[in-house]
Image (cartoon, coloured by chain):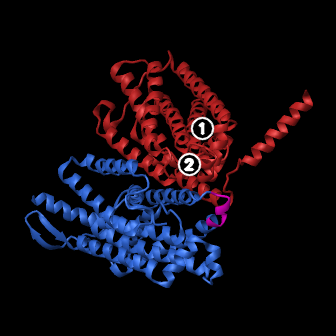
Amino acid sequence: MEVLVAQVINGLSLGSIYVLLVTGFNLLLLAAMIIHFAYPQVVVFSMYIAWVVLRYTGNSVPLAVLAAVGASVAINLASAPLFQKIMKNREEVDINSTMVVSMGIGMIITDVLSHGFNKGLPISFPRQLVGDVALFRFGLISLLSGQAASLAVGVLAVSGVFLLLYKTRPGRAFRAIAEDPNGARLVGIPLLSTGLQSYALSGILGGLIAVLLALMLGYASPGLGEQVAHKVLAVSIIAGLGNLPGGLVVGLALGILEALAQGYLPGSWSNAIAFIVLLGVILVKPRGLFGLKL
Amino acid sequence: MPLPLYYFLAITAINILMSWALYLPYRVAHLHFLTVANMAISGYLSGWLVQGLGVSFWAALPLGFAAGGLIGWVISLFIGEAPTFTVVIVGFTFIYITRTVIENTKAVGATMGMFGLPLVAGSPALHRWTILALLYSLVLVVGFLIHRFEHSRLGRAASAVFVDKDLATSFGVDIAKLGRLLQVFSSTVAGGCGVIYGFLYRSFHLDFFTFHLVGLFMTIIFVGGYATMWGVVVAAPALYGLTLLFPPEVASWRIVIYGAILVAVLVLKPEGFVTRRLVLNLERLLSSQRKKIQ
């Protein structure tokens, strides 16, 4: 029983990372109507930038956080013109092109990380910065500071993004541009600046996720983004693309499933179990459990 | 025949076949990455049949085709008319599951892979000529079938589905059946390619079937042109040959180069270099020349 409870706690914190990534992914989907498949790769890139800053500033955490957020925002803003050019061609190009461009960006980021940082080897964050301080401990059951932080930020981020998109004027402007750029222009919404704001916002969220991931995992590797990207897209599809509460439920469920598989199965099979379950659900419900919100 | 030329010709043929396997389902907007998993499954299956059970290569090859087709058919029952992103994630998920199963299966060498597969013909030179003859015969047969498909009612139906699914349905196109047909055909081709790919190197290793392969095939299709089958024929040798021309220190960044080319082409030349209009103009030109000669 203790193992079960401990693994559920681990699963909730792992799931909260998926929730954060799915929320960032959905934000771009709802605000810019792009399937940013490489969003997790951008997050992992930001982790690497934070690692570099930590190394050269004597483990200055504020600077590392700033660097992670800055890197994520910079990549998002740099890729914005590419996506916007494709969206302009939407009449002649299929919408899936944004996903393929994003995959291309992901290929570049993953390969740059494996060639340009730490000789392609995984990086580890300084032990004193990793959130492994136990807030409480009871036998095998414990709640670490990193786990609590990621869970809290996950719930806050989903609520915040939900409120922003559906209850505020800027949120309505984001969705209007994504839905119908010409209509949005007619009602006086500045397309360029509002579009860029949505990319910057998801960049800020990406930077914060990078910090939390570093806090929770304590390491990063070039292939991490790729692996997480597939899970994030799978979670988004199962939840229903653009469905923020659905992403919260499915993200946490996936985290718990993975943690239970790790607890009860040989290590090399646990990842496959998560993918088999994801595959099974996608095959039976290809349009998601909770419906599309686009 | 010099070895570098042999490998260039053989890998170009594999790239053409696999890119066609990806191109064909994309005619109905399905990015069917399951093909890469099928390649691995059929390849390892044939390796096990030949090395483990002593079956001849010529008996294992059709079984490889059949295994690919069978898996493609089963999966297509669920995703025959699924949205593009769902098909994408099913493919990626399948690749992960396949890799994990192979990693944990001792009969196919687990993480070590399979080495020392027998020659498919009497001597090394004859082996090489046989592999090339087999590959290019397959290129001709598959190319012919795709060409016939493109000029048939089904090809026109696929074009209609790509542009507007609702319109295609109202014209009486059975989207699910068409999607299934194309997915099964592409999986069958991929299965056969997987067998030949392994016997080309006379070994199988998980590193042969990575996400880089997905990136390469995707780049070939979108750079060559996703609207006609001829784009693949032009882009496959050009992109593979391009990296062979670079010095080793630059060539090791080939994924970054492919990714950058992919993004640039999608943004600047969305239909790729060999467009439908270009092919139509060439066909008209050839037809008028033929009439002049007659």
Give the chain ID for the red colour.
B
- Residue B62 placement (x, y as % from top left): 47, 23
On screen, residue B101 above or below A135: above
Residue at numbered disc 1: B16
Secondary structure of residue under mark 1: helix
Q: Quadrant of residue B262?
A: bottom right
Number of marks: 2
Q: Chain of mark 1?
A: B
Q: Nearer the viewer, residue A95 or A116?
A: A95
- Residue B6 placement (x, y as % from top left): 59, 30
Q: Name the disc covering residue B218, or none.
A: 2
Mark 1 residue crowding within 10 angstroms, few (<14) / some (14–19) / many (20+): many
Identify the magenta region: A87-93
Q: In the rendered view, does A81 fall on the left or right side of A292?
A: right
State the quadrant of the C terminus of chain B.
top right
- Do pointers 2 and 1 mark residues of a single chain? yes
Which residue type does callout 1 highlight?
Ile
- Please give the name of the residue rendered at 51% of the width and 79% of the height, measured from the top-left corner: A172
- Please give the name of the residue rendered at 39% of the width and 66% of the height, measured from the top-left corner: A21
Chain A, colour shown: blue
- Residue B50 placement (x, y as % from top left): 39, 22
Q: Nearer the viewer, residue A193 or A281?
A: A281
State the quadrant of the N terminus of chain B.
top right
Q: Name the disc covering residue A204, or none.
A: none
